[in-house]
Amino acid sequence: MTAYFIRRILQMILVVLISAVASYALLNLAPGGPLQGLRQVQQGGRFQITEDDIARIRAYFELDLFLPYRFTRWLIGEPRGPLVIGGQEYFADLKVGCRKPIESEKLNVDTGEYESIITGCKEDVFMKDLVGRRVSRGVLLGDFGLSWKVLRDRPVTDLLASRLPKTIELLGLQSLLSILIGIPLGVYSAVRQYSRFDYIFTSLAFMGSAMPTFFFGIVLILVFSIIPKDAGWMYLPAGLSESIRDYSIPIIGAVEAGSLKDRFLHLILPLSVLTMVNIAGWSRFVRASMLEVMRQDYVRTARAKGLSERVVIMRHAFRNALIPFITIVVFTLPGLFGGAIITESIFAWPGMGLLYIKALGDFDYPVAMSIFFILAVLTVIATLLRDVLYTLVDPRIRLS
Amino acid sequence: MSAAQVASLSPEAVTIEERSPFQIVMRRFQRHRLAMISLVVMLAMFTITLLAPYIAPFKIQELSVNKYFVPWGTVDAETGRVHHMGTDHIGRDYFSRLIYAGRISLTVAILSVLISETVGIVIGAISGFFGGWVDTILMRFVEFMLTIPQLPLLLIISSMLLRNEEMIAIPDPVLKFMGDILLLSPRDSRNAVLIVMVLAGFGWLSAAQLMRGTVLSLREQTFVEASRSLGASNFRIIMRDMIPNAMAPIIVDASLGLAGYIVGEAALAFLGFGITDPVPTWGNMLAASQQFMLDRPWLPLVPGLPIFLCSLAFNYIGDGLRDALDPRLKL
């Protein structure tokens, strides 16, 4: 058992590390990045930007360091300078980056544009130059560094802390509602298999799981927000998590911006989209596993003992039918953190998903990498948790 | 029943009409009414998008200056062509773009399915057939890929690929081939090739797991033993015994995969990390329509409905195929 856990945890660390290296490399190897805007200004010719300015900005974003050093500085906050052992400095002259790369312009025949290609290095960065540079304590110690663009120079942690409550509010309620509604629906339609309810419900759930969230969200905005608003009926506000100004809605009346009522009204639409899509998937799953269990011998035995149908279904069938459901529920854990990327961006819900999209779009790599890193950690934890829970609820399954 | 009675029955009386396995599957599939309707809908959609250059009155990038958001059915005064669905915010014919978008979305989905299922079949068959360390390495890799959060990683990869298109060298014949299918210039089809690579790069994982499971159970079957005793090579056993017998779940997976890729491609384009304007896809047309929907509420429905219909239809077809191909269900 202990050996199993040690092996699993080592595997988890490996998975997280490899995915962090891969995504960090993907984001940072590519040209563009935070310097792109600068180049456009430079090409526009409105400001004279000297080579030293560019070198300073590159140093500010650590773009002048080689990728492996940048990565370890991001991950564990090292190296901060030459290694000092017993008053003696080591590796002080190790080349760790390039302050002023030599760029040559090359005409791209396909696009007809000039592209700059780095061909050499005018001035190197050495290990001893790293002394005194600002550096984060490293992601592993919970310091996610500073944001580049979304909230410039503010700690990423602040940014995450401001978005996280919104996402947990939306996703937490969503999981709760989906469980409360989805499970009974699934069980009921399994118990009444081939009834009219089962037939209608199964086809609705089928359509629901085929429905792309982004289209569903837009349709809901149309039907419950835009069209009734134009017609002067009662409507639901769509977009953001609370409004900026006071407003009034027919029937509901005046709504104060930021009040509980306002926040509730804004929550309804995104919550409905997420919940309905989730219910569709989850209840189909519960229905299938319930049908599977109802065919088992122990259910027949329970009936043969003369137990009431209610007890048979609730005590004997339902409990066992929920075992495979654990797999799904556990994975709401990373979901709670990551937010629903698509739904949040349709409704401009200021949560983690929207932040992630924005960070990727604005080249704010520290923010994007932090979210991705935490998500990867939570996902592997959820995977382990699922396997452990499996053995707890079903003694036939052994960890090995 | 006496012997005399049996003898009196003519041979014609006991033989039933012979059916090939394909006919049996077709008959079973036809019983799934919604799957049949879906099949007809999809055939219609394929025909329309195949005939795009003959049906669409305008080219996708043709601008009608000063004619933004003209109403449905407006006739172009100079050439007499009709804007069946009006024009978009910069005066391009909406109907023509919708048809070409369908061609692009469907092609991307089909190519992604073909590539991911092929890779999945090969990897899964090798892994399941040979077992041992080959199996361990391959399946550990698949599990590893599946533990990484998918959509966030997909977004990172596609945003990087699309922003730095020039960095990835795609052979010109590939671009030209894609351009010929999509009726685009090779340069414009670059995006589409990249998206296929991204989607298929993740899609083969589940196909490989599926194939491996099937091969593992087939390996113990007597007909494989029979082949081996007749001196068949590993390659021959995989190609002639394993793959054809494992096709049923793969076909179902592929038809459900088509639905997944259409939605996936549209979602990437919708979020701005997929194929971008001026090349039309249903996803980016939907995203573009979002900013005008306050004034024109019907606008998002036009590109959104085909996405939904395709997703639903492929799901139903997959469902029908699952019923039809499952040998445990007897007619």
Image (cartoon, rainbow, N blue to C red):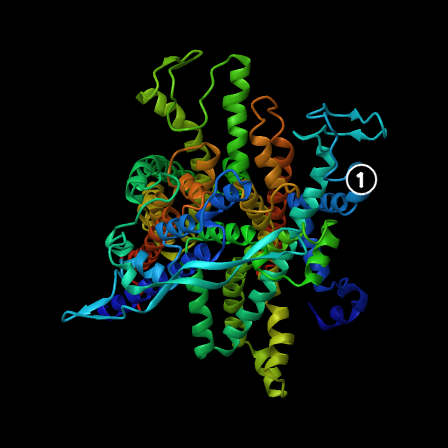
Where is A327 relative to A255, above or below?
below
* Residue A11 appearing in the image: yes
Q: Is residue A26 left or right of residue A16?
A: right
Q: Is residue A134 left or right of residue A97?
A: left
Q: Nearer the viewer, residue A94 or A50?
A: A50
Residue type beneath disc 1: Ile
Where residue B292 appears, x then y in whole percent? 58, 27
Q: Is residue A20 left or right of residue A281?
A: left
Where is B196 relative to A266, above or below?
below
Where residue B164 appears, x then y in whole percent? 55, 54
Q: Nearer the viewer, residue A368 or B102?
A: A368
Where residue A255 appears, x then y in whole percent? 36, 15
Outermost left residue? A86
Q: Quadrant of the N terminus of chain B?
A: bottom right
Q: Nearer the viewer, residue B223 or A88?
A: A88
The residue that appears at 53% across and 21% down in the rendered structure is A226
Q: Quadrant of the C terminus of chain B?
A: bottom right
The residue that appears at 52% across and 12% down in the rendered structure is A232
Q: Is residue B18 left or right of residue A323?
A: right
* Residue B41 appearing in the image: no
In this figure, which residue is indicated by the disc labeled 1?
B55
Label 1: which secondary element: helix
Res B247 quadrant in image: bottom right
